[in-house]
């Protein structure tokens, strides 16, 4: 550990030198009055990825009450709060761009409406460590040492002072942030007590500002969500007390209603309910089973040895579908594979929107059944397997339906959205189904097989492009993995580019640690990987020094990314 004076002197000496002179700062730690500053990585030029800087405050100086350290969910919530606090204070105290390229920039990982485990801030009983990026300033490729001094000795200390010391924080706001997030986790754990798969609290604001914003619609414009009395359930929470709202029951639930009345908005809120949300998001008390998976058709995706026989069987030329492969799957085969891959990973809740599905996989009405006999149709539609999924496998389905009224025959619960207001419609749907029989015949499909996990072949994963490992996100929806680009754009529950980055390095980590060993199934690989990271922290996947840009993905999205790698081979 060197004195901060050494850093000051070094910046003096290298002023007006070539940019490479900044490398003298790399791998050094400097002691300031109330914190330590580490520089594990220095960028090669002002246009490259900004330098890594760690800001470390001892626990006794930060002086957070022990209450915040008593539960993992509280620690996660504090880390999230401090990340947002640092971002706010960077905007307040940092001058920003000065010089060429990324000169003068100070950054921390972006946050959204969800609260997810991150590596941007580490909070524990010994220290707080914030991991930021700093664009070391230059004019052209000439060091601007005095500008760097301003950043390290004026701006960064102010950000640390206002962000990482408990005495300087808005204590009531912090406490509310942590309590809200903890209550969501508690509420999610309580779902099974009432045989529910999801819960939407009364007065939630589900609509977003726009199609490109995740922020809530202004309360003066939005219609608050209020549960129909017949479907209302109540929970007791430690800080908020009694909370009431709509309970989505285990089994088969339909969301119906006219176009633009809020069906997909409700499903979207439920699909994001696998994560905790910040206070004032509007969906902070919308919670869903952690393992819920949004299913859709995905034309063109690759499929590798997936047993889709419960939905598609008896193909022409006697082609088997028990180990189905395709380089360019159709809508129906891709959706069938997406369902079976989700089941392989242990989901107990499928979320489906009719609008994004393959129609021929969802329904075959009576007229089509008469025209095209079952002998000539290899597809067993989802409507004829959804009950079997629940009765035999314990897997529930929440389905948005706008046109396929035949699903009334299999529904356990029907919620109608009417101008963003839900009302109970189970009885009405049942009455209509009795008065107007669909006249379609239930088609007998294959039973669902024992879900044995497929075993990935390690040699089919090559993260190298040339001699170097090249694994990086290209936005949220694309992951470069060696010479391949993995398309993640249809994984609607992937919400942060940091998750995409983590997925890439988690795969590489699993290869290096022989977790992906050619013996373990995909569920076993993910289970061991997450077990290790729960002990060592998500930062352990970083190939160099701890990286502040990782966000924890769910096992479901990690497995989905592996399944979409076009070189994947299953043993």
Image: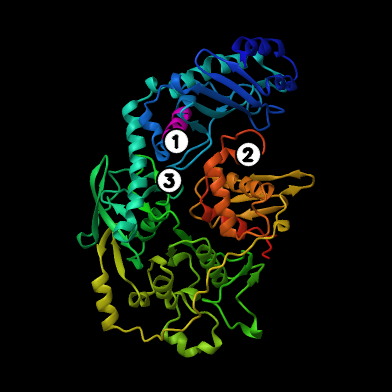
Q: Is residue 81 magenta?
A: yes
x, y (%) of residue 197? Answer: 36, 59
**Mark 3 vs mark 1: in front:** 1
Residue highlighted by disc 3: 214
For this orientation, the residue located farthest to the right is 467
**Sequence-first disc among 1 and 2:** 1
Residue highlighted by disc 1: 80
Q: Is residue 551 visible?
A: no
**Sequence-first disc among 2 and 3:** 3
**Quarter of the image with the N terminus in it:** top right
The numbered mark at residue 209 is none
- Above or below 528: residue 423: below
In the image, 174 versus 524, the foreground residue is 524
Taking 31 as reference, is 464 left or right?
right
Are dots 3 and 1 in contact, CB under 8 Å? no
- Label 1 – label 2 distance at C-alpha: 20 Å
Task: Tell me which segment is drawn in magenta.
Answer: 78-87
Q: What count of labels does the image hold?
A: 3
- Label 2 – label 3 distance at C-alpha: 29 Å
Q: Is residue 228 visible?
A: yes
């Amino acid at each position: 550990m060197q004195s901060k004076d050494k850093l000051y002197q070094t910046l003096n000496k290298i002023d007006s030198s070539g940019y490479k002179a900044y490398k003298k700062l790399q791998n050094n730690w400097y002691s300031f009055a109330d914190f330590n500053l580490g520089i594990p990585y220095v960028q090669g030029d002002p246009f490259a990825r900004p330098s890594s800087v760690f800001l470390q405050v001892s626990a006794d100086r930060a002086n957070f009450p022990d209450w915040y350290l008593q539960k993992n969910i509280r620690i996660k919530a504090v880390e999230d709060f401090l990340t947002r606090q640092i971002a706010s204070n960077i905007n307040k105290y940092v001058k920003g761009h000065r010089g060429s390229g990324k000169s003068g920039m100070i950054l921390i990982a972006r946050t959204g409406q969800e609260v997810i485990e991150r590596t941007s801030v580490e909070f524990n009983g010994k220290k707080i460590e914030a991991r930021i990026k700093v664009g070391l300033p230059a004019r052209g490729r000439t060091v601007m040492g005095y500008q760097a001094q301003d950043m390290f000795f004026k701006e960064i200390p102010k950000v640390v002072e206002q962000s990482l010391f408990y005495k300087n924080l808005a204590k009531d706001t912090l406490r509310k942030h942590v309590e809200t997030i903890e209550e969501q986790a508690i509420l999610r754990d309580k779902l099974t007590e009432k045989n529910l798969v999801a819960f939407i609290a009364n007065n939630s604001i589900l609509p977003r500002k726009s199609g490109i914003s995740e922020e809530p619609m202004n309360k003066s414009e939005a219609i608050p969500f209020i549960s129909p009395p017949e479907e209302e359930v109540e929970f007791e929470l430690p800080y908020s007390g009694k909370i009431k709202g709509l309970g989505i029951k285990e089994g088969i639930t339909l969301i119906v209603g006219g176009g633009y009345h809020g069906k997909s908005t409700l499903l979207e809120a439920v699909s994001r309910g696998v994560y905790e949300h910040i206070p004032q998001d509007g969906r902070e008390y919308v919670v869903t089973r952690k393992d819920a998976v949004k299913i859709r058709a995905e034309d063109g995706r690759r499929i590798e040895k997936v047993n889709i026989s419960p939905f598609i069987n008896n193909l022409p030329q006697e082609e088997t579908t028990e180990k189905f492969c395709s380089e360019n799957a159709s809508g129906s085969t891709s959706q069938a594979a997406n369902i079976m891959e989700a089941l392989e990973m242990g989901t107990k809740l499928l979320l489906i929107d009719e609008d994004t599905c393959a129609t021929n996989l969802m329904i075959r009405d009576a007229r089509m059944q008469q025209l095209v006999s079952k002998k000539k149709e290899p597809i067993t539609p989802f409507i004829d397997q959804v009950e079997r999924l629940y009765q035999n496998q314990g897997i529930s389905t929440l389905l948005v339906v706008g046109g396929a009224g035949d699903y009334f025959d299999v529904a356990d619960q029907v919620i109608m959205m009417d101008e963003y207001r839900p009302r109970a419609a189970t009885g009405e749907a049942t009455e209509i189904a009795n008065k107007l029989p669909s006249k379609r015949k239930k088609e007998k499909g294959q039973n669902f097989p024992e879900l044995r996990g497929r075993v990935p072949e390690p040699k089919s994963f090559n993260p190298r492009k040339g001699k170097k490992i090249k694994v990086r996100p290209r936005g949220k929806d694309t992951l470069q993995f060696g010479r391949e680009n993995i398309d993640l754009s249809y994984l609607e529950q992937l919400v942060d580019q940091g998750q995409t980055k983590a997925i890439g390095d988690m795969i590489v980590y699993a290869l290096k640690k022989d977790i992906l060993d050619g013996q373990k199934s995909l569920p076993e690989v993910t289970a061991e990987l997450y077990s290790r990271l729960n002990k060592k922290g998500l930062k352990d996947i970083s190939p160099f020094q701890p990286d502040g840009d990782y966000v924890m993905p769910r096992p479901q999205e990690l497995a989905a990314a592996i399944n979409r790698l076009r070189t994947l081979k299953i043993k």
